[in-house]
Image: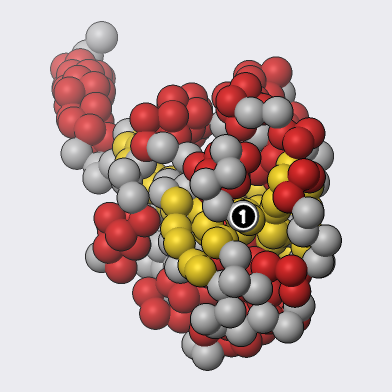
């Protein structure tokens, strides 16, 4: 090997060593992708359900993914407003408001129990004697999750309005989440519960009560399921990678295990126009335009 070749060989080795030293540092210094999940269930259970998904996403992206599960809706919404989340899973009301105010863009929607739609509902005990929405006049109704809950409050209230009841015709209260609303009605602490219809099928709810003793007094039409959105300033490449990775979970054994942990049968591509029916309902109930 002559001196010229030895020189270039040494330079090549030097650059290789620099790459090995500094590439891991560059990757490590990338900001983590922060994933926020709304408190549909309690925070600890939510963390357990979605941790495998964030770990899978981290491997696919080649960077850290941090999971955040706020304890209540007030904390969750402040984090949304502060744009703390790069990827966020929430209800349809959260999405349309955050899309207009903070620039979040929907990329996916849930499929649960094989359905990519969900209905708002009013649920009562079968032995309650209540036969129609109008029978709830003067009764106690508990709504799961608070006034920002799309199915459990806004759509449920829309059903009450369609049934001829206005605000003040019934006593209104809130539970921390939809399952707790069902429990309140099941144990006869309230006369009816506002909830997404899928809550009656949740395994954790079925373990706690005999759901066959409850029935739907009213159910809305089927609308696009719970959305997933990304922060507006995320790069197109990163947004597309997140979308394709999560949409593709159903195509592998490992991905199906991740979905099963999150109590999902799939994540499907979603677009903003699918949430126009929700905008109409929100306008009718709250007067807000999104």
Q: Residue furthest top?
A: 1
Asked if 105 appears above or below 57 in the picture, the reply is below
Residue hosting label 1: 191
Q: How is the image coloured?
A: secondary structure
Q: Looking at the image, which residue is at 65% across and 73% down?
A: 137
Front residue of this view, candidates 119 and 156 = 156
User: How many numbered marks does the figure carry?
Assistant: 1
Q: Quadrant of the N terminus?
A: top left
Front residue of this view, candidates 142 and 41 = 142
Asked if 245 appears above or below 190 in the picture, the reply is above
Q: Quadrant of residue 227?
A: bottom right
Asked if 119 appears above or below 1 in the picture, the reply is below
Q: Quadrant of residue 141?
A: bottom right
Q: Looking at the image, which residue is at 38% across and 67% down?
A: 233
Q: Position of residue 196 (x, y in %)?
A: 66, 53
**Under tag 1, what secondary structure?**
loop
Horizontal side, residue 56 vs residue 101: left or right: right
Q: Looking at the image, which residue is at 30% across and 68% down?
A: 81
Q: Is residue 196 visible?
A: yes
**Badge 1 density bin: few <14, some 14–19, many ≥20, Cα 10 Å:** many
Q: Position of residue 188 (x, y in %)?
A: 58, 44
Horizontal side, residue 14 vs residue 102: left or right: left
Q: Looking at the image, which residue is at 18% across and 31% down?
A: 25
Horizontal side, residue 226 vs residue 210: left or right: left
Q: Is residue 89 visible?
A: no
Q: Position of residue 172 (x, y in %)?
A: 49, 67
Front residue of this view, candidates 92 and 85 = 92
């Amino acid at each position: 090997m002559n001196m010229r070749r030895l020189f270039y060989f040494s330079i090549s080795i030097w650059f290789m060593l620099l790459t090995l030293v500094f590439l891991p540092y560059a990757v490590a210094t990338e900001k983590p992708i922060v994933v926020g999940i709304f408190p549909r269930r309690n925070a600890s259970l939510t963390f357990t359900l979605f941790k495998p998904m964030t770990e899978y996403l981290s491997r696919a992206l080649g960077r850290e993914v941090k999971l955040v599960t706020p304890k209540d809706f007030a904390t969750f919404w402040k984090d949304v407003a502060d744009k703390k989340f790069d990827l966020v899973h929430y209800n349809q009301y959260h999405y349309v408001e955050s899309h207009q105010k903070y620039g979040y863009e929907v990329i996916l929607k849930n499929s649960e129990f094989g359905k990519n739609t969900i209905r708002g509902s009013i649920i009562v005990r079968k032995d309650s004697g209540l036969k129609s929405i109008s029978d709830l006049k003067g009764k106690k109704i508990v709504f799961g999750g608070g006034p920002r809950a799309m199915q459990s409050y806004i759509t449920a209230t829309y059903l009450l309005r369609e049934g001829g009841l206005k605000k003040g015709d019934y006593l209104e209260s809130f539970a921390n989440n939809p399952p707790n609303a069902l429990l309140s009605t099941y144990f006869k602490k309230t006369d009816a519960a506002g909830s997404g219809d899928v809550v009656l099928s949740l395994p954790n709810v079925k373990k706690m009560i005999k759901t066959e003793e409850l029935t739907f007094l009213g159910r809305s039409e089927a609308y696009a399921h719970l959305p997933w959105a990304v922060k507006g300033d995320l790069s197109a490449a990163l947004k597309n990678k997140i979308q394709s990775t999560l949409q593709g979970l159903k195509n592998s054994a490992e991905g199906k295990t991740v979905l099963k942990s999150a109590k999902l049968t799939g994540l499907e591509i979603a677009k903003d126009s699918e949430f126009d029916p929700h905008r109409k309902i929100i306008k009718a109930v709250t007067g807000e335009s999104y």
